[in-house]
Every structure is written in structure tokens, then in C-alpha cells.
Amino acid sequence: MKAAVAVLAVLVAACLLTLCVGVRPVAPSEIWQAFTAFDPADPAHVTILSIRLPRLLAGLIAGASLGVAGSVMQALTRNPLADPGILGVSGGAALSVVLGSLFIGAADAGLTAALAFPGAAAASLAVVALGGGLKGDAGPVRLTLAGMALNALLLSAVSAVVLVRSDSLDVFRFWVNGSLAQAADRPLLAMGLVAGGAGLGALLLAPRLEVLLLGAALSRGLGLALVRTQVAALLAITLLTGASVAVAGPIAFLGLMVPPMARRLAGHRMRFELFASAALGASVLLLADTIGRLIIAPAEVRAGVMTALAGGPAFVWIARRLASGARV
């Protein structure tokens, strides 16, 4: 209970910081007035509702989605190094959106966002298959190497595509390192519903994922429908990652950092781990975005760069723990 209260307190604090902190600091009283007595002539009210609130919603959707997707992926592959960003799922979604935008244009934000899902599905299936996950023999090193190779290939393809566009610099920066800066232009409601539905599906799948963590052979012996569970988990990962990429672009390492923290709080109870991963994922992304806006204000460091700066050392730490035989 104390852990749950602490996680929720961190999430609330991250949300308040997102609304209050920026080039122009805003007091909590002004935030309350913006929601209860909006004045279109007040620049603070306009900033809160038109810029910072969409940014907050995008951070909640993307962060929670990646946190839950990371937990599901690590349970599916039994690999603490698994992450939608590192293993290429986010890259597949980004490439799909970029290619679709190149051919059909970006006039319809909803249609453009929907393009993330087939790319995420293809990438998630490819990396699990390449790493041997569908046969139940994916070791951490094998799966990680396959995913990192696929991710490098996909992000190189994204770079090649966006550099032929007239607005290549902004497009390149968004689709290689995600950001919450363009949240107001994203289909937040639709992606929130997709992420919520996929998160609920992951919660329903949690007992089967706990059995899957015991290994493929033992899971079959306990009567688990292995292929059906793997397909359902891949579907949840696809929807969660697609929704995240659609609102924030590819955010690396978030799905790697959050699940180990959630497991320490949840004690390897999968449903509690998923709840904690959602709250911690949203908190970490919002805090990374807030810090990125302050470092070189009035310019900003993109949220994807901030998570990568924190995630690199986390990746090395987890890899060293695995090499020493310790649990993560």
C-alpha cells in the first residue's frame, strides 16, 4: 500500500511540474483558474490549456503505454533487456508512419497515427521470431542483439526517408528522438482509448504471463495455451507501442528502465507490476520532458534524448547484473 501511494504521489508531482514549469512559470492557483474560469485573454490560461495540457496528456499516454509494453515484452521473452525502443518495435512504428505520410500526406492526423500499428506489429513479430522467442528458446543476448540490429536498420530507413522531404530537419528530429512538443497536433483521445484498451487486455493477460515466466516447457505442462498467449501479448505490445509512437514518436529505453523498478515494488505480482509500470512510465517521461525544457531554456532537449541519457547507464547496469547471474 505504501509503495502504491508513493508511486501515485510521484505521478501527481510529475503532472503538476509539467503544467507549472516552462519558459514562463505558472502558479498552481493559475492552473486551477484556467480549468475553472478560463479567460481567453489571459496568456497563462491559453498556455496551460493549449500547450501544456496536451503535452501532459501525451506524456501520460506514451509513458504509461511504454511502461506496460516493456513489462509485457520482458515477461513474454523472459528477458530484462527487452524494450519496445531497443528491440525495434518503436522503430517499426515510426518507419510505417513516415512511409505512409510520404505517400498519402499528413493532412489527416488520425490516419497518420493509425499507420503506426502495422509497423509496430511487423517489427514486434520480426524481433521475437529472429530472437527465437516464438520457440521459447530466446536467450537475453540473442534476443537483444537481434532487436538492436533490427532497430538500427529501421531507424536508418527512417533517416533515409525523412531526409528527402522539404521539412526534413523537424521530421527527422521527431521520428528519431521522440518529443511531447507537438502533442496538440496528435490524436490524443483516439490513442488514449487504444492505449487504455490494450492496457486492460494486458491486465487480463497477467496471470498467463506469470505462468509464461516459468518457461515454455513448464507452461505447456501447466496447461497454458502458449501460442495463444504469445499472440495476445504481441497484440498488446503492438497497440501500446503504436499508441505511444503516434503521440510522442519513438522514445528509447523507457520500457527498459521502468519494469525493473515496478517489479521491486510489486514483488513479481504481474498485475501490480503492470499498474506500477504504467504510473512510473508516465512519471519518468513527464519528468524527463520537464527537465529537458529547463536545461537550455528557452530551447529544449527532446524527451527522447533525455530518456536515452538515463537509459544507457540503466542498460549497462542490467546487462552486468545478468552477466553476474543476479536477478533483475
Image (cartoon, rainbow, N blue to C red):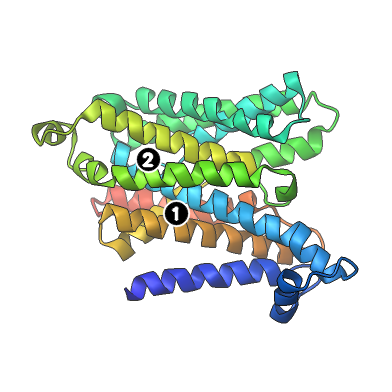
The one of 102 and 197 positioned closer to us in this rendering: 197
Query: Residue 154's spot in the image, x, y percent?
Result: 57, 27
For the N terminus, the image quarter is bottom left
**SS class, disc 1:** helix
For the C terminus, the image quarter is bottom left
Q: Residue at x 59, y 40 (%)?
A: 245
Horizontal relation, residue 243 to residue 259: left or right: right
Residue 156 seen in render: no
User: Is disc 1 surrounded by few (<14), some (14 to 19) or many (20+) residues within 10 Å?
Assistant: many
Q: Residue at x 28, y 41 (%)?
A: 78
Query: Residue 103's spot in the image, x, y percent?
Result: 74, 18
Above or below for 184 versus 11: above
Residue indicated by mark 2: 73
Residue indicated by mark 1: 257
Query: Residue 291's spot in the image, x, y percent?
Result: 65, 65
User: Is disc 2 surrounded by few (<14), some (14 to 19) or many (20+) residues within 10 Å?
Assistant: many
Q: Residue at x 63, y 52 (%)?
A: 58
Horizontal relation, residue 37 to residue 69: left or right: right
Query: Residue 141's spot in the image, x, y percent?
Result: 34, 36
Which amino acid, mark 1? Met
Q: CA distance from mark 2 to mark 1?
A: 13 Å
Above or below for 26 versus 145: below
Which amino acid, mark 2? Met
- Number of residue marks: 2
